[in-house]
Image (cartoon, rainbow, N blue to C red):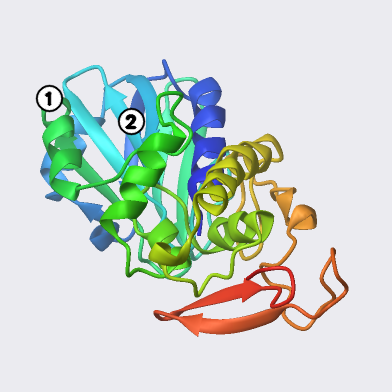
Amino acid sequence: MPELPEVETIVRQLQRAVVGKKIISAKVLLPKIVKAKPDKFQIAVKGATIKSIWRRAKILIWELNNGWSLLIHLKMTGQLIVNGQPSKYTHVIFGFSDGTRLIFNDLRQFGYIKLIKSENLSDFFIKEKMGPEPLDKDFFLADFEALLNRRPKTKIKQFLMDPINIAGIGNIYSDEILFFAGVNPLRRVKTLKKGKAAKIFQGIKKILPAAIKLKGTSADNYLDAFGRKGEFLRKLKVYGREGQKCVKCKGRIKRVKLGGRSAHFCPVCQK
């Protein structure tokens, strides 16, 4: 958390709010957040204009007009807030020539800002071995089935969450996608019939855009780029609903541990 819909929401908002603006200051309050030597970071960033902002998996990419790029990963508790009020959890503050600012908050301090030459971005993401973007218009069911065939022994929730297979799907949306498809998160990929694989794929293409439309899910401390909570929380069917009634069968939602994470599902509806 934040996952793909939350990061995509922030990207779209920052595209409107800060692209084209000149950075006049970059105050680093917690040096470990910035993965670059302080003087090098300041030289690269100060005076640069943000040329474009885009996303790969859960990483925000700021391309600057001077050949440098910033890779920003929010990890578990990171926030990017336009004109936000700094707090004890604020670690970096960007100031812009029009008087606006952008603050980077991170309660647990797992997030980072990495400086990289723009010409090296492709090599960086190749090295990261990230899977396809699930919402890419060229990502088809046949592609998804081919990915499944490579990991027959993997449990399906873990498959969806592994960025090597598909980029950007995390704990929340893997639960919701599998509920939509009626698939138990503990099932091995090899046990899925073609119809179920298609239903999971349909869930990916339906649920992620729906979450983006509602500015993501504020199940924890996620806020969008304007400090607002995402509204998809009210649409969740299983995630975070352990012990509550299933919206379909009125059974009880169950939570189990899976690879160090939690899986929420209805044992009646999901087989």
Tell me which residue sits at (49%, 45%) in the image: 4
- Where is residue 99 drawn, in percent x and y? 51, 26
From the viewer's perspective, tell me whether residue 59 is left or right of residue 173.
left
SS for dot 2: strand
- The amino acid type found where label 2 is placed reads Trp
Q: Earlier in the sequence, mark 2 or mark 1?
A: 2
Q: Which mark is residue 62?
A: 2
Q: Is residue 61 visible?
A: yes
From the viewer's perspective, tell me whether residue 156 is left or right of residue 87.
left
From the viewer's perspective, tell me whether residue 205 is left or right of residue 234.
left
Quadrant of the image occupied by residue 66: top left
Tell me which residue sits at (37%, 48%) in the image: 166
- The amino acid type found where label 1 is placed reads Glu
- Where is residue 24 drawn, in percent x and y? 34, 28
Give the residue pinned by disc 1. 119
User: Is 13 located above or below residue 3 in the figure?
Assistant: above
User: Is 60 located above or below residue 18 in the figure?
Assistant: below
